[in-house]
Structures are given as C-alpha cells and as structure tokens.
Image (tube, rainbow, N blue to C red):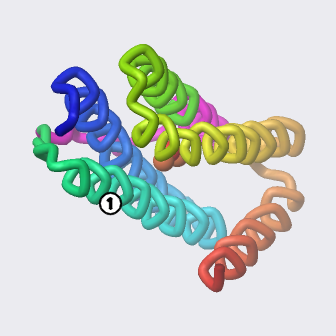
Amino acid sequence: MLDPRIQAALNDQLHHELASAYLYLSMAAHFEAANLPGSAKWMRRQAREELAHAMRVFDFVNDRDGRVTLQALAQPPGQFASTVAVWEQALANEQNVSAVIHDGFELAHKAADHATMAMLQWFVTEQVEEEKTARMILEQVQQIGPTSSAMYFLDRHLGKDAEERKAD
Ligand code: FEO
C-alpha cells in the first residue's frame, strides 16, 4: 500500500504530465496557425509523449495498490506573443515538472519507498533530457529571429525530428 503522501505526490505528478500534454497541444495549434508545420508536429509528438508519461505514473499507482485521482485540467494559454514566448513557456513548464518530480523523489526517499524511488529515477533522468531539448530549441529560436529564413530551416528540422522520434 502506498503512503498517502506519496500517493498524493504521484497524483500531482500525473496531473502535471496531463497538463503538459494539454499545453503542448495548444502550442501545436499555435504553430499550425503560424504556418510552422514542423514545430507543430514536434509539439504534437511531445503531447503524446506527455500522455505516455502520465500513463506510466497511472500504472505505477495502480500496481502499488494505490488510488489514482484525476484533477481538473486548467485551460492552457491559447495565444502566444511570439515563437520565442512559446519555447520560453515550454522550458518553464519542463522546469516546473522537474521540481514536482524532485519533490516526489524526496518524499519517497524520506519514507524509504524504494519502489517509488526507482520508478521516479527514470523521470529524473528523462527531465534532464526534456529541459536540455527545450533550452536548446529556445536558444536557437532566440538567435535566429522570427522572420529569418533560418526559422523555416529550423522548423523543417523539428518536423523531421518529430518523425524520427515517432519511430522510437
Ligand atoms: Fe513529462 Fe515533459 O515532462
């Protein structure tokens, strides 16, 4: 049986993973409207990945004889001031998710809940990659500026990247 505090922390993480999927889907819609189809594809792929993260937590809570509780999802932002603003929010979101995961890991560590620590270790490692990727794309977008042809080159690259990750 899961410690109720750890169960609450995992349900909170599950909520953040689902909210991330919702946010990235909204960002995909923004990029579709901005004629940046590669970036839109990248965000759609990311939204699917967040759903997979959520289900990883969902399954773990059930496997440990815990109880999943779903929270209401807030409406994500529908408008973004610029392409840079989108990637800034994506990075801030990943940093926030990392903090939630680290809090859960700390709790599991204090409770000597080794199974939860082992499960969350995967997420700790994954977040290093997620933050790195968002930070890298943000820096590239900041460097090239919104109207330069380099933005279309980057957009094509992100679309290709999303295609390759689909095959993972
Ligand atoms: Fe599942 Fe991007 O955090």
Q: Secondary structure at mark 1?
A: helix
At 82% from the left and 37% from the top, the residue drawn is: 139
Q: What's the amino acid at mark 1?
A: Met
Q: Is residue 92 left or right of residue 111?
A: right
At 22% from the left and 40% from the top, the residue drawn is: 75
- Stretch of the chain drawn in magenta: 72-92
Q: Is residue 104 left or right of residue 68?
A: right
Residue 26, position as x, y percentages in the image: 38, 53
Residue 130, position as x, y percentages in the image: 65, 45
> Height in image: 44 above or below 132?
below
Residue 52, position as x, y percentages in the image: 41, 63
Q: Which residue is mark 1?
A: 55
> Height in image: 10 above or below 42?
above
Q: Is residue 7 magenta?
A: no
Q: Is residue 94 left or right of residue 153?
A: left
At 44% from the left and 60% from the top, the residue drawn is: 47
Instruction: Count neighbours of disc 1 (C-alpha within 10 A) and say few if under 14, some if 14 to 19, many if 20 or more.
Output: some
> Height in image: 35 above or below 27?
below
Question: In the rendered view of the protein, which quadrant contains the N terminus?
Answer: top left
**Residue 147 or residue 140, whichever sits in front:** 140
Residue 144, position as x, y percentages in the image: 87, 45
Q: Total label count?
A: 1
**Residue 97 or residue 59, whichever sits in front:** 59
Question: In the rendered view of the protein, which quadrant contains the C terminus?
Answer: bottom right
Res. 111 image quadrant: top left
> Height in image: 93 above or below 67?
above
Residue found farthest to the top: 110
Q: Is residue 80 magenta?
A: yes
At 80% from the left and 57% from the top, the residue drawn is: 151
Q: Is residue 151 left or right of residue 55?
A: right
